[in-house]
Image: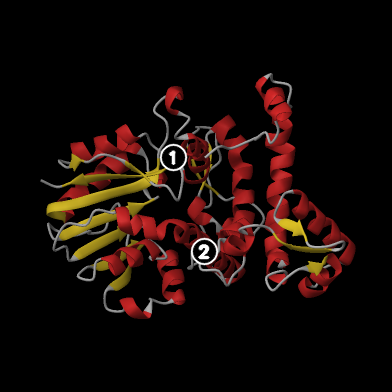
Amino acid sequence: MRLGAIPETPLEWLGLRLGRVPTPLIDTHLAFAFARTVMVAARVGVFEALAEGAASSDEVARRCGTAPVPTRRLVMALVGVGYLTPAGADRVALGRHVRRWLTRDSATSVVDKVAFAFDEWRLVEGYEDYVRRGVTFGMHGVAAAARGGPAETAASAPDAPSGDGAPSAGDGGADADAAKEAWVRYQRGLRAVAVVSADEVARRTPVPAGARRLIDLGGGHGLFAAAILRRYPGLSATVLDLAPAVDAALAAGVPADLRGRLEHRVADALNDPLGDDDVDVVFASQLNHHFGEADNRALAVRVAAALRSGGVYVVQDLARPADPREARRARLGALLDLYFGATSDGGTYPIAAMRAWQTAAGLRPARVRWLRTLPGLVQQTAVKP
């Protein structure tokens, strides 16, 4: 997937090729203005207001309960960036594919991830402190964003200030409420992203013949586990995650068709028991990038001990290029390596590193698989002999 300035005409292509296009302006001012426009439109309900058909900007304002003149400007901005299309002299309609992704009645809606972008907006404000002083910010303390900024939770630089830790449900009063609300937004956002690729993940995840037990590490919402269970009727799954994530998942409820086969349990993947030579599949999706190298190696050893012979360990995560020559295919992993470094003191890893964890744990790595529905995401699987 290409990121950045994309030419639409031969003249634009030539200008970009010759270095005549001020791409830093596109990548900064225009990019964040574009992002915020879509975020605000989703939050105030513009796309929902147009879900039933075309309307004027004044009608959109009435349906959304927003100010008419600013709404008109917002609507025109959305037309300009292709999210809305003209439907007459003074009416607009949803752009192509917008109904699929940005209306709540769609099975593939990513509205909740767009809503979580407001939290992430504040989190990435910590990039400069991270680069200058090595200060990292706890992504799993996202409730801090609800209080106006990222909470410092770790520091690798000697002169960096110590943080107050991630807010938890045990905090009192307003902070506890903000923590719960932020975790719910976080889990809904993760689920919205998972919806895009759940079917492909279920198809591609290797499950041994006769498998009975799957452990989903850090699976939160449980959407991937649910998709795999529907494909393999003889399988049951336990989703292990931190308490706030499990609380959010349980509040949403277990799908009726999977009751008795899908459970959530509070656990720390790095320390709590995973199993003892009795698990067929250990599945970890976008979990390893929150851990450092040593923790990932230790986790692979614990996973290997939990797996029965022939069991598989599936690391599903963004791949980081091993060197600049590999950046083209793994560009998203490179971009988000900075994000996870700043927000969780982790980072993305090259495929070779994932394979090394598995090999050192006595597992046999298989060929890597690149997912099509989420560019940059891979499945690196290994089998226990």
Q: Earlier in the sequence, mark 1 or mark 2?
A: 2
Disc on res. 299: none
Residue drawn at 26 percent across, 74 percent down: 261
Q: Quick one: 241 or 97, which is closer to the camera?
A: 97
Residue at 14% x, 58% y is: 276
Other-residue count near label 2 (Cα within 10 Å), few / some / many at <14 / 14–19 / ≥20: some
Q: Are marks 1 and 2 in contact (CB under 8 Å)?
A: no
**Corner quadrant of residue 354:** top left
Q: Which residue is mark 2?
A: 108
Q: Nearer the viewer, mark 1 or mark 2?
A: 2
Classify mark 2: helix, strand or loop: loop
Place of residue 353 in the rendered image (x, y in percent of width and height, measured from the top left): 31, 34
- x, y percent for residue 228: 30, 63
Image position, residue 11 (x, y; %): 73, 27
Disc count in the image?
Answer: 2
Looking at the image, which residue sits at the far right? Answer: 69
